[in-house]
Structure formats: C-alpha cells, structure tokens
Amino acid sequence: MEEQTLNLIEGTVSSIIFQNEENGYTILRLEAGQGEVTVVGCMPGVAPGESLSVRGGWVRHPSYGEQFKAESIERRLPRGVKEVFHYLASGVVKGIGQSTARRMVEEFGEEALNILEEEPEKLTAIKGISLKRAKEMSQAFRQQMGMRRLLEFLSKHDLPVQLGAALYRQWGDVALDVIKSNPYLLVSEEWGVDFAVADGVADALGVGVDDPLRLEAALLFELSHNLNNGHTFLPRNKLLRATEQLAEVREDKLEQALEALLTRDEVVQDEVAGETAVYLADLYAAESYVAQRLSIMSEQHPPVSKNIKTILKDIQRRQGMTYAPQQVEAVELAAQSQVMLLTGGPGTGKTTTLRGVLALFESMGMDTALAAHTGRAAKRLGELCGTEAATIHRLLETGFDPYSGRLVFSRNADEPLQADAVIVDEASMVDVSLMAALLDALGEDCRLVLVGDPDQLPSVGPGCVFADLIRSRAVPTVRLTQIFRQAAQSAIVRTAHMVNAGQMPDLRANDNDFFFLSRRDPVAAADTIVDLCRRRLPERMGIPTDQIQVLSPTRRRGTGTAALNRALQDALNPAREDKEERRFGEYIFRLGDRVMQVRNNYDVLWREPDSGNSGMGVFNGDIGRIIAVAPKGETITVDFDGRQVEYTPDMLGELEPAYAVTVHKAQGSEYRAVILAAVDGAPMLLTRGVLYTAITRARELFIIVGDENVVARMVENDRQTRRYSGLRARLAMISGN
C-alpha cells in the first residue's frame, strides 16, 4: 500500500467489519459526505451509530482498493433517535440487543443514553428489565464510557491509544483520573512513554517545572532508560547531571526529589566499588539476590560418589572418546559443586564437556533440565545433547499478569522447578533479572551449571552476569583453553581465536570455511551479498538460502540491515500477484519472508499444530517465517520453529525482516553459513567483540564481504562500553576474594 496525502473525514459509523478487542484495531465503514468509506486503524470500542472525525491518509490496498488509514480520531456519542438506536442495537453495551434497544428508544427517545448512565432505575419501567438487570446494563455502559474518555484523552495528547486497554485493566474506571493526577506514571518501563511526551501532557494539565512529580519522574526515567544501555545502576553524580539536562532544573531541586524517592524505597542507594550507586528497587533486589544465592551455592559441596573415576571412564567409553584433562576437571567439578561455570572459546570442547556433565548427572539418578536464552539456542542445545531443551522463559513457565501488566513466572521459590540440576547454555546472554528469576525457581539442593563465552557480546538486558561471575572468582569455574585438532583445522575457529587475541587474520588465505571478498563500495558489497545468497552458495556449495544468515554491525548506511533486507527480499522473495503481503511502516511483510521478533512480548499466544501444545510469549531475537497473510491483511501468521503466532496489525511493530540482522541480534544463534558485511559503521559498533561474536555464529562457512581496513579497525578496537554493575563487587565482598 502507498500512503498519500493526509486528510480529514467526518461521518457516522454504519458497520464494523473487523475489530480486535485486545488492541482496538478496527476496520469499519463510515457514512461520510462522499459516500461510504472504509476506515482502518486503532479505534477501540467504536460502534455503529457513533459520529467520528478521523484524521489520516488515503492508502491503496493491492486487493481491496482505497482505504482511509486513521492516525487519530475524535468521537461523538450518537444524537437523535436513529443514531441512538443503531448504537445500542450494535451490541456494544453488554446486555442490550436489538429488542431491548428498540424498547429503550421507544420509551426514552434520544435521552436513552443519559438514562442508562445516570438514572438506570428508570429502565425498570420497560417490561422485562428488572432493577438488577438495569444496574448491570448501566455498569457496563459506564465502564465503556470510562474507557471512551480515557481513549479520547490519549488521542488528544498524541499518546498511543493502544495504552487504553492496559491502563483500564490496571486502574479500571478511575484510570483517567489517575493519569490526570500524575501523567508521569506513563513514563515507567511498564507503559514505555517517553519523558518528553509525558512532560507535554503534564504541562497541558498545569504541572509546574519544579513540581516534585516531574522531578521524581525524570530521575526514574533516567534510571529506566539506562537499563537499555546495560546498566543496573547509575552513579549518583552521573544520575543527577543527566537528569539536570533532561529536566532543565537545578541540581539542588533534584537532590530533594531523589531523597524523596529513597525515603519511599522506590530507588535504593548503596556503595559499590567506591561508587555511590543508585538503583531502581527491583534491579537492586535482583542483583543482591543473585550475589547472595550464588555465594551460598558456591559454598555447598554435595557428597561425591567414591566411584566417580569409574563413572567417568564409562561415560567416555559410551561416547567413544577420551576427555582432555580440562574436560575431566570440569565433569569432576560438576560432581562436587552445587554451582559451576564452564567457559571457553570455539573449538575447545564445551559441547563435549556439557554432554559429559549431563551424562554424569544421569548416572547419578538426577533429573536434569536443559535451557538457553533463545529458542534457536535451546533447539540447538537439545539437538547436541540428544534430549529436550527449553528457553529459560519456558522453563520458568512465563506468564503475563493482566492486572499489573508485568511478566510473572509460575516457577519460583513457592513452586520450584522439579529438577535436580539445571544446565544453561549461552549464559552470557542472561541478564541479572532473568538470572534472579532462575535462581529463585531452583530447589534448595538443585545444581546449576552455566555454560558460555564471556568474550561474546553481553546480554541485551541489564548487567553482564556471566562475565562478572567469572571475574569475581567466587564461583567454581573451569575455562577450556585447548583447541582440539579437528577444530584447529577450521579457519573459522582459528580466526575467532586470533581476533579475540587482537591479531589480524590473513584475509587473503581464503581457506575451506573462511573467505574474504574485498568490496570497499557499499553498493558493490550489497550486490555481492545478494548474489552469494541467491546463487553462488546454493549452486556452488549446496547451502540452501534459508540456511544462510547475513549479519551487519549496523542497522543504517549502505550495508546496514535495513538496506540489505530490502535488497535480499527483492532477490529471494519477490512480489507476485498471487503472493499476499502487508505494508507496515517502512517494511513490506510478504508470504515466505524471514522475520525476527524485536522485543519481548509475554502476552501473545503461540500454538504448535503438530503437538497441540500452546503457551504464551515470543522473545527478542526469535526468528521465524511468515506462513500466512490473511486476504484482507488483518493478520500475519509466523512460524517460529514449529510454534505459530498470529500477529494483528498493531503488533507488526514488533517484527522486522531478518534476511539480514545485526550481530547483537544474532547472539545465541548458530547458522550453517554466515556472511558479514564489513564496509562502514559507527566506531562504537566496529569492535573486536562484534567481529568475534559474528565469526562464532558460523558452523560451516564464514564470509566477510567488505573493506580490509574496516576489519583491521574492528580487530584493533577492543573498546567495551562500560556497564555499571555491582554483581562482581558484591560477590567479591561476600566471598572475601
């Protein structure tokens, strides 16, 4: 669809074609001056008979012609007997159908709505309506009016109307009053409104620049915003300076606001490694709990079987291999410890060692759960170990609390996991909040093995848990360093270790599984990448297109993921008249496209058609394929490794094309072939960690397309963005290291 000029249309809703009650996405027919018009957009609760003023733009749907896409709406309750009847007869008010609507209008005329809201007892004059039923009908109408006024307020202040349902779920009839009394409540992580937007609403409501509500909200916003940068806390002086710039007020005013937050325990202040650290309360609790629980677990030494050596020999015999000394050390440590860390670079035998630990636990009669952060990583872990593995979220039975709007876990201290041991792979991806939830769900005697590579990029969420645990030396750890002969024959493995050591690989060698194609011009590089995916790798190396993943350090510029996705989609899944598609913003989602979920959504249902299983939640980084686009474009169905999710139009902002993804988004995944675009990018993205992580995503083939000088800069740039995290210091303090 191509958007054209914005416009304003006014009219009366004649019919509702489609309406999603959860998110308000609606397709309706509007009787306007120029005849009936199809209007699409987020219009929660709109019903026939209502008068609308709709601002938006005309779009042309490839199958359904011209439509009007609503950007904002103003609503007016029905006027006159005819409009009131159509409104009530539409079923929009629970308990009122056509027959009841007709009798109400016959009795009260156009005053029927006022009677319904203000004087429901008068409805008992109508035969068949008891006082109880009248009150129930009135309550349903008042609730609807509460939602309606809330939505009108959101629309008036350019706030996402999708917030309406969640706000009403949280506060009910008083939601609008709550927001008016403190519009800065919207700035919390739960609602995700930018401080500047809420500030505009507050200004319109007369909130002063120095109002404590505003200053406290600004401080909380800075702390919440910096979770996205990986920080679990901010030093007090940095927090005050950053908030001073944001709110444009004097620091002494902010000092007072911060003290008020501390008094109410909304934030926590603590000394961490010489810094006066300020935390959001839940992050402080999570970090403190992780440190305390792991310290306790590190001191526990379960009884070890006297015949552990015999068990180990039997495991190696059954697996048909002989473990290296470090691998034997790791398996023995797992037998002796309640918690341990297993780390090492590519080719050092982490997978073999992990299998050994799993076999050891099985031989000890222990029920072991395998988990990883992402679905793809969990699937790979299960395949490597020959048993079922789950995402950590699924293991903890993630749910969504409709009243608080927050993520909840069914498995916790009250309902712990029914497992004797838990092994977590790709542990470097686990942030401090998820680690706290996992530890909370472990039984008192449950063992925990964390496997990962701290040299890869850190978790998307706050903290750098795995690296902090290793550096603290407070948790039993084995680092595998021996590169096995078979792995050493792989140029991918050799190159990864060279890059990690700060050594420039020989890009001209072009070994059996590592190639460099020099393309300094972004256009030429993009053309080469497309040709590799479409023709050269499938035809010459027998690698299907769907087993090739293109990576880029950046989203923008000529070889960023945005440009590469457009080029790859055109080449690999071009438009056809018989192929359904849907435009959303800058993207076209087409049947057969590879797509990625780009934020955690705990409140979405997935189904497994083959098994009949179902559950909740899709997560940031999950990659799937579009298997269906509804003929009218209302929904798109995506298959994530057998789990199918139906996306309504308002959810499409959570999807992006995934023919090319950033290296950060590829964490935890492994692909048969990886192509890295290395032409341009911001210095903060062209780092050694990004290059190392990209290389280690490839299983059989790794190709760099780009500029040798850019690769050299990445190898030299070992700058790591500092994350404020107190976990290492807390562990060291507790353990005395």
Image (cartoon, grey):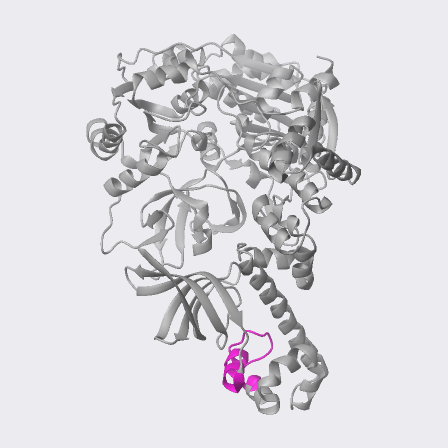
Where is residue 352 drawn, in percent x and y?
Answer: 47, 19
Question: Seen in the image, is 672 located left or right of residue 170?
Answer: left
Q: Residue at x 28, y 59 (%)?
A: 62
**Where does the N terminus fall, quadrant-wise?**
bottom left
Range of residues picked out in magenta: 80-101
Question: Seen in the image, is 620 located left or right of residue 1?
Answer: right
In this view, 127 is above or below 359: below
Total numbered circles:
0
Where is residue 411 drawn, in percent x and y?
Answer: 65, 41
Q: Quadrant of residue 135?
A: bottom right
In this view, 480 is above or below 184: above
Where is residue 159 drawn, in percent x and y?
Answer: 54, 54
Q: Quadrant of residue 528?
A: top left
Furthest residue to the right?
Answer: 263
Q: Quadrant of residue 393?
A: top right
Q: Is residue 92 magenta?
A: yes
Question: Seen in the image, is 524 located left or right of residue 505?
Answer: left
